Structure formats: structure tokens, C-alpha cells
Image (tube, rainbow, N blue to C red):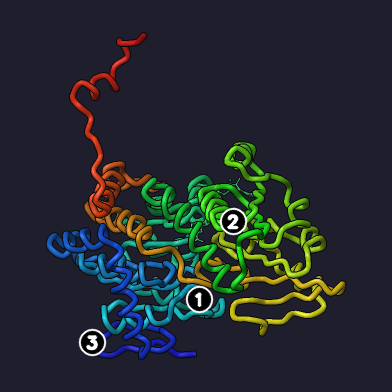
């Protein structure tokens, strides 16, 4: 295992292989071409330096798009360090390039074990950041436990994903939260596009890259019909799959039914599915009672934040043999009745473990929202200790810039329409 190193012109880092930087840089710049909103913000940041002198720690998936966000924050004057928000999502070439080409201290190695994962989170907090960014709230959690003495130094933290926001709201409810947090995930410029179209496309991409399976004619079971589930279900249908949705909440279940999907219990779907995707943020959505009834060759994977949605321990217990060597990112579980169940990406986010995560065009909006939220918290807003929404002004700015980048013009309200839409007098 490599140990943290430092060269005079480089920040501290712990990456797999610094010589991968060249390929990482090439891919970072390729993604940047598809991130016009973030580029525009970066140019503004370079001039105005809204983050000057602030140390910012980002615990995010270390991908090409994240690299472009980190470049933007650095251009705004921040000293930026980062670590991975998932042990299996790091792109090692990107981690290397962040250090070598962009002077950003990176502590992330793909497939790092749990101890290394937490060592990297600690390495980042040991540098006393005053703004943090999280994807899943592991960094903030550590800041409230082992590093709680440092919490008072932090102006605010930004949270990128649904599961992280759920954890932070639970901390707020329990009176445990010590810092202001901005729920970037809950911005419309994030979840409507990133969770739906980003997770939708990249989850299918991950399944196809790992297995090469034909979607057309396959029975795909999607566990959860939230923003991510909608995206996965509609993209699978677009490729000709016969899609079944499972839910626990009546409204999304009804929505799925009226969107034209079959809706049923997982116990029923388990018997007929060819490919299973969980994307709920919940635990044990697929467990022993389901594995028992699955067809030979069933493919199971997860695109929710944590690797708890599939009960892998139960699967391992039921299996007479586990074969990790069947194909890259595929583990075969052989059942005693000769059925095989194939788990992708160790049950971790399949779109990042088996593919490269969301397309840059969609991360352009999520990370533009992150960058402007960072500018907002750094601007002396004196935020209360709670979970905050992203200000509407930021959302409007990001959407307006994205439309402009896409060459789309929209109508404007006339003065009369504005007046009409805010009045109650005129009726039938
Ligand atoms: N793969 C990625 O890149 C990516 C991107 C964004 C979000 N996420 C993660 O995906 C998960 C879902 O996010 P979201 O924004 O769609 O959340 P969401 O809250 O919009 O939807 C989750 C849905 O799952 C349903 N659900 C909960 N428990 C269930 C169960 N046992 N069986 C069936 N359905 C169940 C809920 O009723 C809800 O409708 C979260 O963990 C989030 O952090 C992953």
C-alpha cells in the first residue's frame, strides 16, 4: 500500500500511481468540454476569487467531472484537497492527474479497503478544512465524531446525494448537527437531472459494460421508483427491456403503474426477473427470501449510495461456491441447486464501480450548483446550524446558463402576465 508522499511543488497525496496522470488529464479535459456551465463559473471564479484563502475538503467520487469541479474551486482561490466517497468509485488516473497537473491533494485509490478509506478521510480532516463537500455524509460524520473538536472551524458543508441528506436531516432531528449544511442534492438543478438522467443512463451503462447483456427482451426489476429509479426504469424500457418496479410507498408505486410499468412485490418479481437493480437508499431490498426464487443466471446490482441494498452476506451464506474470477466486476454465487446468481461491482454503485459514473453534461449542472453553493457559504452569509436549501437564485442561474449553453431560448413573462399570475381578482 503506498504511503502519503509530498514533493516540493506538489501537495500531499496518496494515489495508486502518479504516472497515470497523463491519461487522467486527457480525460478530465475531455469531460470539461461537456461542462460549459462549470467552465463559465470557473472563469468568473478566477477573476473574483470568492474562495480566496479558504481550505476546502471534498469527499466525492473521484471522477473526471469531480476533477473539473475541484479545478473550479481552486480557480476561485481555495486550497483544495479531496478523498473518495466510495472505495470503488475512484478513477486512479484522475486521482493522479489532480495531484500532478492541478496541484490538488488527492487521497483516493480504487478498491481501497475500509481502513484505507477512513485513513484517507482522516488525512483530509487533519488538514483542517473550513468548507467540506460530501457525497453520502461520511466526512461530516467523522467531523462529528472523531474530529468533533474541529467542527467549530467549519463554515458549512455541501451534501451531494439523497442518502447523505437523509443522514444529515436525522442528525438535525436528533440535535447532533454542529455545522450548517447545504442540501445540494435537493436542488432541482441536481436531482431532476443527475439522479434521473445521470443515474438512469450510467446504471444501464455499468450493467452492460460488466456483462454485455442484451437489454431488449430482458425482464429488468427496478427496486425503488424515486428520482434514480425513474431514470433507470425509463432507460431500460428505452432499450427494449420489460421493466418491473417494486416500491414501498404508495404514491411512487402508483406513478410507476401509470407510467406503464408492472408494479409488484419483490417476492413476486424475484421469480421472473433477469436483471435486478436496487436504487432505494434502503437496506436489504433484496435478501435471502428473494435469492431462493431467482432464476439461474439472474444478474443483481445496486445503484443506491451504500452497498447495503442487497444482502450480500446472506447470499454468500446460501452459496456453495463464490467465484470472483468469472468476469471483471462480476462475482458468481453458485447455489446448491446449481443455479448461479451474478453480483455486479460487489453491490456498490454499479454506475461507478462498473462504468464511469454520470455523463459530464449532467454533472455540469450538479457541480455548477455545488460551486455556486460554495461561493454562497463563503460569502459571509452566517448560516444557522441546520440543513439549508440551495437558494432559488443559484438554481435559476444554473438552469439559465445551461439553457444558454444548449442554445435554447425561452419566452419571458410580459408585465401583464406577471400581474395576472400574482393576482386573485380575475376569474371566469
Ligand atoms: N448511483 C448514483 O450515481 C446515484 C446518484 C444519485 C443518488 N444515488 C443514491 O440512490 C439512492 C436513491 O436516490 P433517489 O434520489 O432516487 O431517492 P428517492 O428518495 O427519490 O427514492 C427512493 C425510493 O425508494 C423507495 N424505497 C425505499 N425502500 C424501498 C424498498 N425496500 N423497496 C422498494 N422501494 C423502496 C422509496 O419509497 C422511494 O420512492 C440513494 O441512496 C441516493 O443517495 C445514487
Residue 36 occupies which quadrant of the picture?
bottom left
Disc 2 beta carbon < 8 A from ligand 1? no
Q: Which mark is residue 9?
A: 3
Q: Is residue 248 above or below residue 343?
A: above
Residue at x-position 56% and y-position 61%: 303
How far apart in space, not on screen, are marks 3 and 2 (Cα)? 52 Å
Q: Is residue 259 above or below residue 324?
A: above
Percent across and percent down for residue 392 are 31, 41
Residue denoted by label 2: 240
Of all residues shown, which one is farthest toward the right?
337
Residue denoted by label 1: 117
How far apart in space, not on screen, are marks 1 and 2 (Cα)? 39 Å
Residue at x-position 51% and y-position 45%: 173
Mark 3 or mark 2: which comes first in sequence? 3
Percent across and percent down for residue 10 are 27, 85
| Mark whose residue sits in front, 3 or 2 | 2
Percent across and percent down for residue 8 are 24, 89
Name the foreground residue: 410 vs 224: 410
Q: Is residue 171 left or right of residue 395?
A: right
Q: Is residue 181 left or right of residue 29?
A: right
Percent across and percent down for residue 31 are 33, 69
Q: Which mark is residue 104?
A: none
- Whether residues under marks 1 and 2 lie with C-beta atoms below 8 angstroms apart, the answer is no
The local secondary structure at tag 2 comes to loop
Mark 1 or mark 2: which comes first in sequence? 1
Name the foreground residue: 345 vs 234: 234
Amino acid at each position: 500500500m503506498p504511503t502519503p508522499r509530498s514533493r516540493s511543488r506538489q501537495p500531499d497525496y496518496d494515489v495508486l500511481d502518479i504516472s497515470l496522470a497523463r491519461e487522467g488529464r486527457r480525460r478530465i479535459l475531455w469531460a470539461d468540454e461537456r461542462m460549459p456551465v462549470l467552465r463559465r463559473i470557473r472563469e468568473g471564479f478566477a477573476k473574483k476569487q470568492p474562495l480566496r484563502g479558504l481550505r476546502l475538503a471534498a469527499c466525492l467520487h473521484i471522477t473526471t467531472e469531480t476533477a473539473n469541479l475541484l479545478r473550479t474551486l481552486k480557480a476561485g482561490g481555495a486550497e483544495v484537497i479531496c478523498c473518495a466517497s466510495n472505495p470503488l468509485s475512484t478513477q486512479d488516473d484522475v486521482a493522479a492527474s489532480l495531484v500532478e497537473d492541478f496541484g490538488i491533494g488527492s487521497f483516493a485509490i480504487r478498491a481501497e479497503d475500509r481502513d484505507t478509506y477512513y485513513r484517507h478521510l482522516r488525512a483530509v480532516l487533519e488538514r483542517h478544512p473550513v468548507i467540506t463537500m460530501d457525497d453520502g455524509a461520511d466526512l461530516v460524520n467523522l467531523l462529528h465524531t472523531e474530529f468533533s473538536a474541529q467542527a467549530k472551524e467549519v463554515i458549512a458543508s455541501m451534501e451531494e446525494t439523497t442518502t447523505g441528506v437523509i443522514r444529515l436531516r436525522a442528525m438535525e432531528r436528533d440535535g447532533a448537527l454542529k455545522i450548517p449544511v447545504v442540501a445540494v442534492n435537493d436542488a432541482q438543478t441536481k436531482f431532476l437531472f443527475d439522479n434521473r438522467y445521470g443515474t438512469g443512463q450510467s446504471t444501464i451503462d455499468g450493467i452492460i459494460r460488466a456483462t454485455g447483456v442484451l437489454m431488449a427482451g430482458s425482464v429488468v426489476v427496478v427496486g425503488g421508483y424515486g428520482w434514480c429509479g425513474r431514470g433507470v426504469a425509463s432507460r431500460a424500457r428505452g432499450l427494449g427491456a420489460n421493466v418491473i418496479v417494486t416500491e414501498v410507498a404508495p404514491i411512487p408505486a402508483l406513478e410507476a403503474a401509470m407510467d406503464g410499468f408492472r408494479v409488484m412485490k419483490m417476492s413476486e418479481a424475484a421469480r421472473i426477473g433477469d436483471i435486478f437493480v436496487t436504487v432505494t437508499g434502503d437496506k436489504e431490498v433484496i435478501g435471502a427470501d428473494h435469492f431462493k426464487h431467482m432464476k439461474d443466471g439472474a444478474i443483481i446490482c445496486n445503484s443506491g449510495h451504500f452497498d447495503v441494498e442487497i444482502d450480500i452476506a446472506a447470499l454468500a451464506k446460501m452459496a456453495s461456491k463464490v467465484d470472483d474470477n468469472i468476469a471483471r466486476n462480476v462475482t458468481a454465487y453458485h447455489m446448491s441447486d446449481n443455479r448461479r446468481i451474478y453480483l455486479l461491482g460487489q453491490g456498490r454503485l454499479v454506475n461507478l464501480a462498473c462504468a464511469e459514473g454520470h455523463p459530464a453534461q449532467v454533472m455540469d449542472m450538479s457541480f455548477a450548483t455545488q460551486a455556486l453553493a460554495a461561493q454562497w457559504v463563503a460569502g459571509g452569509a452566517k448560516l444557522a446550524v441546520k440543513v439549508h436549501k440551495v437558494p432559488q437564485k443559484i438554481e435559476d442561474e444554473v438552469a439559465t446558463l445551461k439553457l444558454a449553453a444548449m442554445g435554447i431560448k425561452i419566452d419571458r413573462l410580459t408585465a401583464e402576465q406577471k400581474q395576472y399570475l400574482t393576482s386573485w381578482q380575475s376569474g371566469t
